[in-house]
């Protein structure tokens, strides 16, 4: 079983990376393989809603979004991390998530459906709960079991070293890794016991103005 840790910070080795690394170390101790994927620090445009992905199975803009989507099928779970910018996830991560999840939806890729997912955020001081709420909505839309910890999945600090001083935050990341490993093992045990996934239904979209 493998989990992909997605670093949505423009700073490759910053606080978000540190938080994800703690989650990853916890997962590895439970026998779950992990890889780190950095979305990069080049400009990422937002979704145009152009429908190109529905015809081709990938986004019109061939950048790290398509790289990620090509990898996603090989992973059993995901942890998405982002820094807080003005009480929401960094703009590049928002664009990344919009396009990745919209492509998955429009192209009927089902890359995330019924795969455990979690989000973590890092901030110097505040705005974490708003950013968590924002990012969790992607997982809910994609029918992903959302993994929790003992508290909200956040760390505080201006530098990676300061993140390590946030003892509660470090524990939250560690428990998050344990909880995700437990969920993955339960899913695997269910498959071995013959438990089948719920039957998929065609999506119903209700438009309020006709």
Image: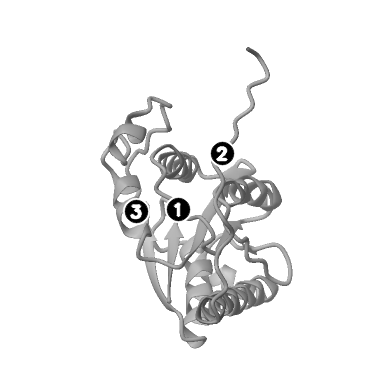
Residue that appears at 47% across and 72% down: 21
Kindly report the distance in space between the C-alpha atoms of the residues bearing marks 1 and 2.
Answer: 33 Å
| Residue beneath disc 2 | 203
| Residue beneath disc 3 | 68
Q: Which label lies toward us, 1 or 2?
A: 2
Q: Earlier in the sequence, mark 3 or mark 2?
A: 3
Question: Badges 1 and 2: C-beta atoms under 8 Å apart?
Answer: no
In the rendered structure, the answer to whether residue 57 lies left or right of residue 111 reads left
Q: What is the x, y in percent for residue 161?
A: 53, 71
Kindly report the distance in space between the C-alpha atoms of the residues bearing marks 1 and 3.
Answer: 15 Å
Q: Which label lies toward us, 3 or 2?
A: 2
Tell me where residue 208 sits by quadrant: top right
* Viewer-side residue, 207 vs 135: 207
Q: Secondary structure at mark 1?
A: loop
In the rendered structure, the answer to whether residue 56 lies left or right of residue 159 reads left
Q: Which mark is residue 9?
A: 1
Q: What is the x, y in percent for residue 16?
A: 50, 61
* Viewer-side residue, 72 vs 79: 72
Residue that appears at 42% across and 32% down: 47
Q: Earlier in the sequence, mark 1 or mark 3?
A: 1
């Amino acid at each position: 079983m493998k989990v992909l840790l997605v670093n949505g910070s423009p700073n490759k080795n910053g606080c978000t990376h540190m938080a994800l690394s703690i989650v990853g170390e916890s997962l590895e101790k439970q026998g779950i393989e992990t890889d780190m994927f950095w979305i990069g620090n080049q400009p990422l445009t937002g979704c145009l809603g152009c429908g190109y992905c529905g015809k081709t199975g990938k986004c019109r803009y061939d950048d790290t979004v398509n790289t990620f989507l090509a990898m996603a099928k090989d992973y059993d779970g995901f942890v998405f991390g982002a820094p807080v910018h003005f009480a929401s996830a960094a703009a590049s991560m928002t664009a990344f998530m919009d396009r990745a999840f919209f492509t998955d939806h429009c192209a009927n890729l089902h890359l995330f459906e019924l795969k455990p997912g979690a989000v973590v955020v890092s901030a110097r001081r505040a705005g974490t709960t708003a950013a968590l709420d924002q990012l969790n909505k992607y997982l809910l839309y994609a029918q992903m079991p959302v993994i929790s910890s003992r508290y909200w999945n956040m760390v505080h600090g201006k530098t990676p070293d300061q993140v390590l001083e946030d003892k509660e935050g470090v524990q939250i990341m560690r428990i998050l890794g344990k909880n995700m490993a437990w969920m993955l093992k339960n899913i695997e045990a269910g498959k071995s016991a013959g438990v089948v996934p719920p039957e998929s239904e065609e999506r119903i979209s209700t438009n309020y103005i006709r």
